Image: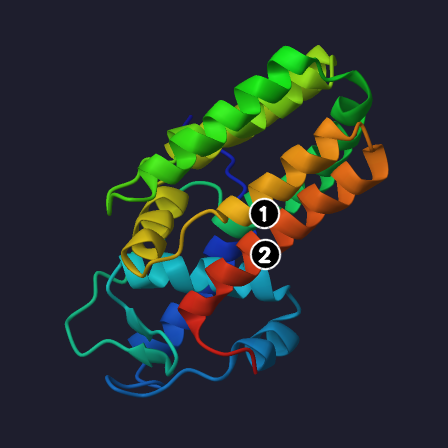
Amino acid sequence: MEFRTIKTDRLYVKVAEQLSGLVKDGTLKPGDKFPPERDLAEKLGVSRPTIREAMIAMELSGIIEIRTGSGIYVSHTKPKLDTADKGVGPFEILEIRYILEAEACALAAARITDEQIAQLKMALRDMAEEEKHDDASEKADWTFHKIIADASQNSAISAVVNWLWELRNESELSTAFLARLRKEGVHPSIEDHKRIVEALEQRNPEKARNAMRVHIDNASEAAATHFGRPN
């Protein structure tokens, strides 16, 4: 008796399979432009971040070409038509970070030590130094957010925040997309991070929560520019 492994695909994989089918059956031909992101989200009943992650997977497989500022087109090269699961998507990670890290930052504002404030300022300097290089690893960015999670004095929060960063770095979908963003000149905002430090230094939980939310919102918007102007 033979059994097949039960597998639950990520939502973006299912979307990518359906959209790739339009290329495979000739509904969309090489050079054709895909419908706008908003229209696809409405027709498929999914979020716009899910559409973006499906498009990243399709771009990695050579099915489409994303022309920043122009749109998304069917590739002229012969695609692999491979839409297999490539790990958790970058926009999913940003969504959970928005929820979790904002609250971690608020807790940290009430509990952070002077030594940890000093560590954050050092991480900021390291971040600014990293950004001078095209192949910036964003290790300083990870360190910055880890210090805040640790400053919340909640070991569960600290473990989950650290796991989210590991998850991002282990995902083919996320790492490939972030590498493309860096090539396009999209980097973590030093100014956003400075505002977070200021709020923490003032021991102001509400200001710290909002500063982290603004930072992750800005990171999401910057990542979305890869797909062109919102429509």
Q: How is the rendered protein coloured?
A: rainbow
Say whether residue 70 is left or right of residue 193.
left
Picture coordinates of residue 187 (x, y %)? 41, 50
- Viewer can see residue 216: yes
How many numbered tags mark residues here? 2
Q: Quadrant of the N terminus?
A: top left
Task: Give residue 67's quadrant in the image.
Answer: bottom left
CB of mark 2 within 8 Å of CB of mark 1?
A: yes
User: Disc 1 designates what residue?
Assistant: 192
Tell me where residue 97 appears, x and y as whole percent: 63, 39
Distance between mark 2 and mark 1 Cα atoms: 8 Å
- Considering only vertical position in the picture, is 46 above or below 130? below
Q: Residue 28 falls in which quadrant of the image? A: bottom left
Residue at 59% from the left image edge and 82% from the top image edge? 39
Helix, strand or loop at mark 2: helix
Of the pair 26 and 143, the residue shown nearer to us: 143
Amino acid beneath label 1: Asp
Q: Residue at (41%, 82%) from the top-left corner?
A: 34
Identify the secondary structure beneath mark 1. helix
**Could you tell me which residue is drawn at 59 percent across and 66 percent down?**
48
Image position, residue 175 (x, y; %): 35, 42
Vertical placement of 120 versus 13: above or below? Answer: above
Q: Can residue 85 be seen in this view?
A: no
Q: Nearer the viewer, residue 80 or 2?
A: 80
Q: Earlier in the sequence, mark 2 or mark 1?
A: 1
At 65% from the left and 22% from the top, the residue drawn is: 149
* Image quadrant in which the C terminus is located: bottom right
Would residue 4 appear left or right of 197 to someone viewing this image? left
Residue 46 against residue 139 in the figure, above or below: below
Residue 79: quarter of image: bottom left
- Mark sitting on residue 218: 2
